[in-house]
């Protein structure tokens, strides 16, 4: 915003916090009087922060130059409320280079607290202060965020709602969902001997150590960290926290990360479904537009039903897959997920004829995806000596520090690090993958897949192995030593 008159230019900055006057003497025929300046400021709406000293100098002697004629008051942002935790709940950071030096007996340092210990203190938000523009307008400060501190199992909330205290000995934990912060304590359980037919299935809320083995056909379901000093054989193990197996995992299904594993699968299904619905909407609109131009009377629902049958039969399968996944859960689904399923089901089959718009369906799916985006869970890691003929899932990293993994499917939302060999099966990770050897001399089917931006590193990769980074696939056609696979600037996989 600027104006020029009698060789004098007035400029207001974009944020309206300063006004500048530029005087060019050679263009000024006479010295402007106070009325000129006051009228000029009034015309531009400058009401606040006028520097009277500068104004007086310009009236007396308008020397050439640029002057700050007015200063606004910037808004002062406040501070969001935050929770101060009085315990440590994370393992020490270890770099990939230091992995071989990790003492795996110490990597899971489970924190513990005594009863009547203060676990967390809430510091309320501090409001900011609005600013003022040189034009007199208010410049609003950022709104501050208040959190809702709550006490979970094994803890109590103070009367003023600003502190959580433990009511039992055990492991403190934190759960965050949106603005709600829940702090509680889980007890630690020591299981002596094997988990077998004599002991029955092991289910526990809290950290657990098993001094023996987990035997055939047993179920271990732990809401916390688990350490097994023996082996796991032909068992089903579900752990919400970290898992360490001192010996071998054989012919077992192991899931580490608890609720986060389920949430990640649901989010992936919703994301695929959203993409399909978006493509369906675009195509339906295009067809509807062409038919309208040709003056053909066809209902939108008819177009949707035809497209679902001819072009998008996959959507029905996606809805069925998601419904079955949700129905297997004992816990009640969040309202956002229920609404999304109801909305998408309403356009499947004969119901498609009633469809007037896909906007509501798209919005419901987006809200469900946002819900799962907002859920924060700490990555859960697996450490084992070796793995055979098993299916392993982790929301964090998978580390195999012994012989390796064989004929197994390993899926990690973090990294996978195998000190020995990986032969037969699939390694699927979002982060980097590192192994001593990948594949086998006899060409056993072996796939390694990771997200774009990550690398695959191995001392030896055998012919017949499939490497995939993002959507790019590299079939290995000969043996390679000291391999570092990555995406180059052209978007292709290269081996160093």
Image: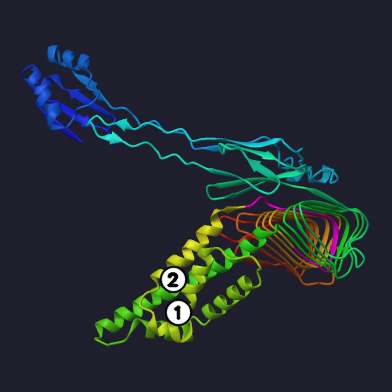
Residue at mark 1:
347
Question: Mark 2, residues whose alpha carbon is within 10 Å: few (<14), some, or many (≥20)?
Answer: many
Q: Which mark is residue 320?
A: none
Residue 327 sits above or below residue 230 on the image: below
Q: Quadrant of the N terminus?
A: top left
Q: Quadrant of the C terminus?
A: bottom right
Q: Which residues are magenta?
A: 377-392
Residue 31 lies, in percent from the top left, at 8, 16
Residue 159 lies, in percent from the top left, at 58, 38
Queried whether the magenta region covers residue 217, the answer comes back as no
Q: Specify which label sits upstream in the sequence, 2 or 1.
A: 1
Residue toward you, 349 or 330: 330
On the question of residue 70 being in view, the answer is yes
Q: Which residue is depicted at the point 75% across and 38% down?
A: 115
Residue extending furthest toward the left: 29
Q: Are marks 2 and 1 in contact (CB under 8 Å)?
A: yes
Residue toward you, 312 or 127: 127
Residue at mark 2:
361
Residue 144 lies, in percent from the top left, at 44, 39
Residue 281 lies, in percent from the top left, at 40, 74
Residue 305 sits above or below residue 68 on the image: below
Residue 273 sits above or below residue 208 on the image: below
Question: Mark 1, residues whose alpha carbon is within 10 Å: few (<14), some, or many (≥20)?
Answer: many
Q: Which residue is depicted at the point 23% across and 19% down?
A: 51
The picture quadrant where one finds residue 384 is bottom right
Q: Judging from the image, what secondary structure is the residue with disc 2 in? A: helix
Q: Is residue 87 left or right of residue 158?
A: right
On the question of residue 483 being in view, the answer is no
Q: Judging from the image, what secondary structure is the residue with disc 1 in? A: loop
User: What is the C-alpha distance between the residues marked 2 and 1?
Assistant: 9 Å
């Amino acid at each position: 915003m600027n104006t020029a008159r009698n060789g004098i230019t007035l400029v207001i900055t974009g944020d309206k916090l300063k006004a500048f006057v530029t005087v060019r003497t050679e263009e000024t025929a006479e010295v402007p009087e106070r009325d000129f300046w006051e009228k000029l400021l009034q015309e531009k709406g400058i009401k606040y922060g006028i520097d009277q000293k500068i104004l007086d100098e310009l009236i007396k002697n308008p020397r050439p130059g640029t002057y700050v004629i007015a200063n606004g008051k910037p808004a002062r942002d406040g501070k969001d409320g935050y929770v101060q935790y009085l315990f440590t709940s994370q393992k020490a950071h270890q770099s990939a280079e230091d992995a071989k030096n990790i003492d795996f007996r110490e990597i899971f340092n489970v924190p513990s607290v005594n009863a009547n210990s203060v676990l967390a203190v809430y510091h309320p938000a501090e409001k900011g202060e609005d600013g003022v523009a040189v034009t007199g307008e208010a410049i609003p400060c950022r709104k501050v965020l208040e959190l809702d501190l709550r006490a979970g199992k094994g803890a109590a909330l103070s009367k003023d709602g600003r502190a959580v205290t433990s009511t039992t000995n055990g492991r403190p934990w934190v759960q965050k969902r949106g603005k709600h912060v829940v702090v509680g304590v889980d007890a630690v359980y020591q299981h002596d001997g094997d988990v077998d037919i004599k002991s029955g299935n092991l289910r526990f809320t809290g950290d657990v150590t098993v001094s023996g083995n987990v035997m055939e056909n047993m179920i271990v379901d732990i809401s916390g960290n688990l350490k097994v000093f023996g082996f796991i054989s032909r068992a089903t193990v579900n752990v919400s926290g970290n898992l360490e197996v001192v010996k071998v995992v054989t012919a077992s299904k192991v899931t580490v990360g608890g609720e986060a594993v389920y949430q990640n699968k649901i989010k992936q299904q919703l994301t695929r479904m959203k993409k399909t619905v978006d493509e369906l909407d675009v195509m339906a609109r295009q067809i509807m537009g062409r038919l309208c131009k040709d003056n053909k009377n066809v209902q939108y629902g008819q177009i949707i039903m035809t497209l679902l049958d001819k072009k998008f039969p996959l959507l029905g399968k996606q809805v069925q897959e998601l419904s079955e996944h949700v129905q297997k859960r004992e816990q009640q689904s969040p309202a956002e997920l229920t609404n999304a399923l109801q909305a998408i089901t309403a356009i499947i089959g004969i119901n498609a004829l009633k469809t007037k718009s896909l906007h509501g369906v798209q919005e419901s799916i987006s809200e469900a995806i946002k819900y799962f985006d907002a859920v924060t869970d700490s990555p859960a890691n697996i450490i084992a000596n070796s793995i055979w003929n098993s299916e392993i899932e982790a929301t964090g990293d998978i580390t195999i520090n012994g012989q390796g993994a064989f004929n197994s499917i390993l899926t990690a939302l973090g990294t996978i690090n195998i000190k020995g060999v990986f032969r037969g099966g699939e390694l699927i990770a979002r982060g980097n993958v590192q192994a001593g050897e990948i594949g086998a001399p006899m060409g056993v089917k072996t796939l390694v897949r990771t997200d774009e931006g990550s690398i695959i590193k191995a001392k030896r990769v055998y012919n017949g192995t499939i490497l995939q980074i993002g959507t790019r696939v590299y079939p290995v056609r000969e043996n390679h030593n000291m391999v570092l696979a990555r995406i180059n600037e052209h978007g292709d996989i290269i081996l160093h």
